[in-house]
Amino acid sequence: MPVLMTSRPTTSSESKSSALLPQCGNPKCKSGWLRLWRSREVPVFEGKWACSTACVREMIEAAVLRERRDAAIPPATHQHRVPLGLLLLSQGQITQAQLKRALDAQKRAGSGKLGEWLVRQKSTGPEQVVRALAAQWGCPVLSVDAFHAASMAPALPRLLADSFGALPLRVAGRTLLYLAFESRPDPCLALAVERITGLKCEAGLLRDSEFQRANAALLRAVFPRVRLLEASSLRGAAHAMTAMVEERKPIETRLVRVHNYFWMRLWKEKSFAGSKIPLPGAGEVEDMVCAFSTES
């Protein structure tokens, strides 16, 4: 005679035990109650604890594929931008003859930006050029006031700052980070910095001379330690990232894509406590920057 199996209500002690059991952030985790015998509280990846190396790897692989997929989405339709020379001409900042002379000089030299030639020929000033560029890109003109290189260097890896001409200027109100560029903002990098730091990122432009002086000071500052990697495949990149996370056991890890780079940041200790700005110190975080080909 078959035995009827009846379910019984969960007791309060069982509910409490289930609630206290750490929840692995890997949705494919199969370790179940084995987690009770694991004494690890870290690593944490994107706010979720990973109970094993296998789960770390699966979580990172999923994040790498997410970044790859999201980057493949076609950008919004390009909006026509009025060329800088015509913009300055329409604003009455230069004459037709001055524009033609600068364009001819640029063509003969085969190098240099139009704005640089206009300033060099004294047709207009650097302030007028940067304001026209800001109008062209729909972004603000920023100031180097209150810039402190040592405090701002931890905002992003030196490789990315140098490669994309980005200058983290300051944090306002503990929530807004100003990111300066010399001639055109890079929304991809600005979004990556925003996702890594958790701060709203406002991209804008600086005058050439101000940018160059401040950027030179930034590149002399101490950046977080970084591992550089060139990956031949996305799986290889994920494998290297997993090894680093398992080695460092960070209290938090975040991963973003910046053009043809993956940028992963690891927090080694609780940051921000007692800090004047909501950015970690250079020694409190560690980065991995992984370059990959577009065919990967």
Image: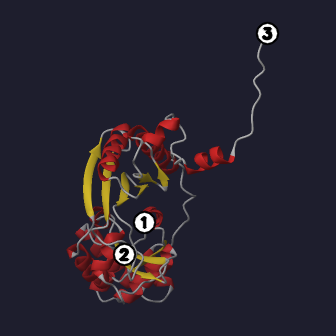
**Tag 2 and tag 3, C-beta contact below 8 Å:** no
- Tell me the residue at 31%/44% (across/down): 243
**168 sits to left or right of 88:** left
Q: CA distance from mark 2 to mark 3?
A: 76 Å
Residue 185 seen in the current view: yes
Q: Position of residue 205 (x, y in %)?
A: 41, 78
Which quadrant of the rendered structure holds the N terminus? top right
Label 1 or label 2, whichever comes before in sequence order: 2
Query: Could you tell me which secondary element the residue under label 2 belongs to?
Result: strand
Give neighbour class at mark 2: few <14, some 14-19, many 20+ (Cα, 10 Å): many
Label 1 or label 3, whichever comes before in sequence order: 3
Of the two numbered discs 1 and 3 in the rendering, the one whose residue sits closer to the viewer: 3
Q: CA distance from mark 1 to mark 3?
A: 67 Å
Q: CA distance from mark 1 to mark 2?
A: 10 Å
Type of amino acid under label 2? Pro
Q: Residue under circle 1?
A: 193
Q: Residue under circle 3?
A: 1
Give neighbour class at mark 1: few <14, some 14-19, many 20+ (Cα, 10 Å): many
Q: Quadrant of residue 61?
A: top left
Of the two numbered discs 2 and 3 in the rendering, the one whose residue sits closer to the viewer: 3
Which quadrant of the rendered structure holds the C terminus? top left
Q: Residue under circle 2?
A: 168
Q: Position of residue 266 (x, y in %)?
A: 36, 58
Type of amino acid under label 3? Met
